[in-house]
Amino acid sequence: MSIIQNLIREIILMIYNVTKSYGLAIIGVTLLIKLILLPLTLKQDKAMKDMKKIQPEIDKLREKYKDDPQELNKQTMELYKEHKVNPFGSCLPLLIQLPFLWGIFGVLKQTPEAVTNVNFLFWNLTKTDPYYVLPVLNALVTFFQQKVMSNSTTQNDQMKAMQYTFPIMILFFSLSMPTGLQLYWLLSSLISTAQQYFLINKGDDKGENQQK
């Protein structure tokens, strides 16, 4: 078990020892992870917005130098430099978040032995959801998250198709996941969607005020 997994496991056990609820322990560790990763989320969102602003100019360059890939690459890099945009700015925060994601997945796939009360509301968090409530909710929240993200970035046809295929994939994956893991995914997705919606609207309001 990795250092991150051990840390997440210990935090879950600490919250569980206080609340005696595995569900509340999962909710607590989810909120904590989201809080820790908030600076990276903000940085990633800024990088995506910066790329969206110069996307029309990139499209013009692609059309102008469509027969000269070398010149296209040169002009594109100069455009990035001129606007102080890092094309990989949204990738690094995502890569840093992955160990936390795999960590929580690794811990929740196998319930810690010290946890004896695995029931939360009407679910047994160590088993799949017999009512299919969480799989459907996860698919719906993922769909809305994709829609919110599409408002902050310029998307090609492949990315637009992912708005519909990714939620379906999440639905089928969730059917075989322990309910505890589904609970984490649902809460994490809800928080991410709310963050993105708030940041996008806040950014749009600032842009309108500057134009005025």
Image: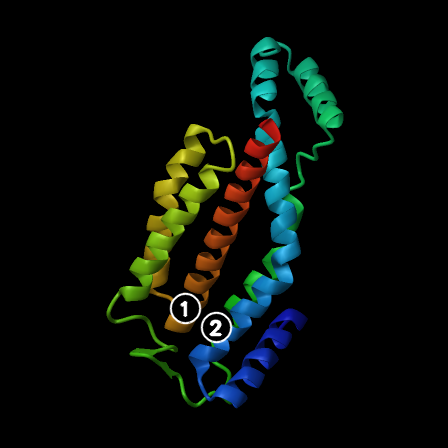
Which of pointers 2 and 1 lies earlier in the amino acid sequence? 2
Q: The disc labelled 2 sits on which kind of residue?
A: Ile
Q: Residue at the spot x=60%, y=64% of the render? A: 35
Task: Please give the label number shown on residue 166.
Answer: none
Instruction: Look at the numbered disc 2 and give the secondary structure of its residue.
Output: helix
Residues under numbered marks 2 and 1 in contact, where contact means CB atoms less than 8 Å apart: yes
Q: Which residue is mark 1?
A: 183
Q: The disc labelled 1 sits on which kind of residue?
A: Leu
Res 95 visible: no
Find residue 122 and report its image quarter: bottom left
Instruction: Look at the numbered disc 1 and give the secondary structure of its residue.
Output: helix
The percent position of residue 100, horizontal first and vertical second, equals 60, 63
Which sits in the foreground, 81 or 126? 81
Q: Is residue 30 above or below residue 77?
A: below
Q: Residue at the spot x=44%, y=62% of the render? A: 185
Name the quadrant of the N terminus. Answer: bottom right
The percent position of residue 181, horizontal first and vertical second, equals 43, 69
The percent position of residue 75, horizontal first and vertical second, equals 70, 17
Q: Residue at the spot x=44%, y=35% of the render? A: 159
Neighbourhood count class around disc 1 (C-alpha, 10 Å): few under 14, some 14–19, many 20 upward: many
Q: Residue at the spot x=59%, y=74% of the render? A: 8
Number of labels in the image equals 2
The percent position of residue 188, horizontal first and vertical second, equals 48, 61
Q: Which residue is mark 2?
A: 27
